[in-house]
């Protein structure tokens, strides 16, 4: 028999706030975290805006001498994981360490470290490359650092599935616990690649918004006047536990994970499959895994990137899966406020979905002023909605046609 898996802790660092509560309060207030890029000189790149995590002090979470050994995405991950562990009050001891693991990743990882090290090499030769360059850049060091921080000796894995990374990480951790291979997992994603190569590269694809004069209005999922997504950075981590393990230690249970779906489009390196076919299969698989009907879903945190085809095809996929219920289920894209956090998006949006269930408030899709006629569902425009729901799903879809969906439920003993 599959074991029940519950959420006992959450942590997030976002462009809207430096911790979980500040981020949540900003999101339900409809606050945008988008502004002018301050982390580098744009050098003529058309997009000059992003969702930066402003005022973040890594020294609050990491020993100063260790900070220089990590790139920023790892700093953010360690901060969010510490928040989640503190929230869960989970203590890892020699007796349980090998039953507690980490599955956490990033979509791009240490690209800023790669940029810096390449400049140092070109200007002054290889001797100016820091010996910490490789550990700063490779993505699995994120999970490694989290495990070392907390002495978690169970499964240690970094998922890398572009914008679906955080969602796949949590889903895979759920399955590890469900089948009995671990008792608890730290899971999610982080990203911090607001740097010339990333912003320039996405601009070369014509994927980013250039609404530089109105940064707070630039990320506008499902709106007819959207002109691309806005890059962001951040981290979202959750603590998952076997129900019996959590109850035995007297843990506060925030929600339950009941379903996970993953699919591939097998279609295009960046574009979603026609009619949202891959996304629809992914949602259907998650709902089937949860053992529920589509009509039981009370909220969808959409992938909703603020791109024309992405938003329209996700809308089509929701209609395919939910049928007549599609127009009744509230949906929102919190990327309208955070921007697109790439590998961190799924982790942060899982935390948001969990808190929406727990607190009975559904965050809005801001900047939805002129709805795209092809996007005609209930996207909770502009203002948060007080509504008690029992089941929420969170969608993430990434380049390469990789799709992931999680299903969360209010905990019932």
Image (cartoon, rainbow, N blue to C red):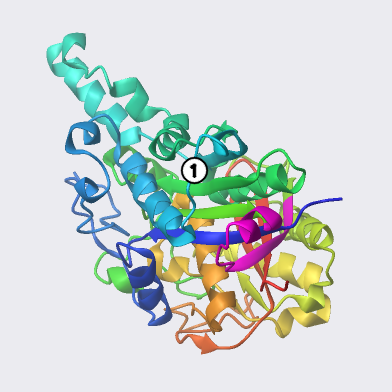
| Residue 163: % across, % down | 53, 49
* Residue at screen point 30% across, 41% down: 72
Horizontal side of residue 252 vs 412, given as left or right: left
- Name the foreground residue: 16 vs 208: 16
Residue 234 appears in the rendering: no
- Name the foreground residue: 27 vs 115: 27
* Residue at screen point 25% across, 22% down: 118
Is 394 part of what is drawn in magenta?
no
* Residue at screen point 35% across, 21% down: 134
| Residue 67: % across, % down | 23, 36
The image shows residue 257, relative to residue 361, as above or below, that is above
Q: Give, as a single range, the part of the protein colored magenta.
A: 243-261
Residue 224 appears in the rendering: yes
User: In which quarter of the view is residue 413 placed?
Assistant: bottom right
Q: Residues within 10 Å of mark 1 (few under 14, many from 20)?
A: some
Q: Secondary structure at mark 1?
A: loop
- Name the foreground residue: 31 vs 244: 244
């Amino acid at each position: 028999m599959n074991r029940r898996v519950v959420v006992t802790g959450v942590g997030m660092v976002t462009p809207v706030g430096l911790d979980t509560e500040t981020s949540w309060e900003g999101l339900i207030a409809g606050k945008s975290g988008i502004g002018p890029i301050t982390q580098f000189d744009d050098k003529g790149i058309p997009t000059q805006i992003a969702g930066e995590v402003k005022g973040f002090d890594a020294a609050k979470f990491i020993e100063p001498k260790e900070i220089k050994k990590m790139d920023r995405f790892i700093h953010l991950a360690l901060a969010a994981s510490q928040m989640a562990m503190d929230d869960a009050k989970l203590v890892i001891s020699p007796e349980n360490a090998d039953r507690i693991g980490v599955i956490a990743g990033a979509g791009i990882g240490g690209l800023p470290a790669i940029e810096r090290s390449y400049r140092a090499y070109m200007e002054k030769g290889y001797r100016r490359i820091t010996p910490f360059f490789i550990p700063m850049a490779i993505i699995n060091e994120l999970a490694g650092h989290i495990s070392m921080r907390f002495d978690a000796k169970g499964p240690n894995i970094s998922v890398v599935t572009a914008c679906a990374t955080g969602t796949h990480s949590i889903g895979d951790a759920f399955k590890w616990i469900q089948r009995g291979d671990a008792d608890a997992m730290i899971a999610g994603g982080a990203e911090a690649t607001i740097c010339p190569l990333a912003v320039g590269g996405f601009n070369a694809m014509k994927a980013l918004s250039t609404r530089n004069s109105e940064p707070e209005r630039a990320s506008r999922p499902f709106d007819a006047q959207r002109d691309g997504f806005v890059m962001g950075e951040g981290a979202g981590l959750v603590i998952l536990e076997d129900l019996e393990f959590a109850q035995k230690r007297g843990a506060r249970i925030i929600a339950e994970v009941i379903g996970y779906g993953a699919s591939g489009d097998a279609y295009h390196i960046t574009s979603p499959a026609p009619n949202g076919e891959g996304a629809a299969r992914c949602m259907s698989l998650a709902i089937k895994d949860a053992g529920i009907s589509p009509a039981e879903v009370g909220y969808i945190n959409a992938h909703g990137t603020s791109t024309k085809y992405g938003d329209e095809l996700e809308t089509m996929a929701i209609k395919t899966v939910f049928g007549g219920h599609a127009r009744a289920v509230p949906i929102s894209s919190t990327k309208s406020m955070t921007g697109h956090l790439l590998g961190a998006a799924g982790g942060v949006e899982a935390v948001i979905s969990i808190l929406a269930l727990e607190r009975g408030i559904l965050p809005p899709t801001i900047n939805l002023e002129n709805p795209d006629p092809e996007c005609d569902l209930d996207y909770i425009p502009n203002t948060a909605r007080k509504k008690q729901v029992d089941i929420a799903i969170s969608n993430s879809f990434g380049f390469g046609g990789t799709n992931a969906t999680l299903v969360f439920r209010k905990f019932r003993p």
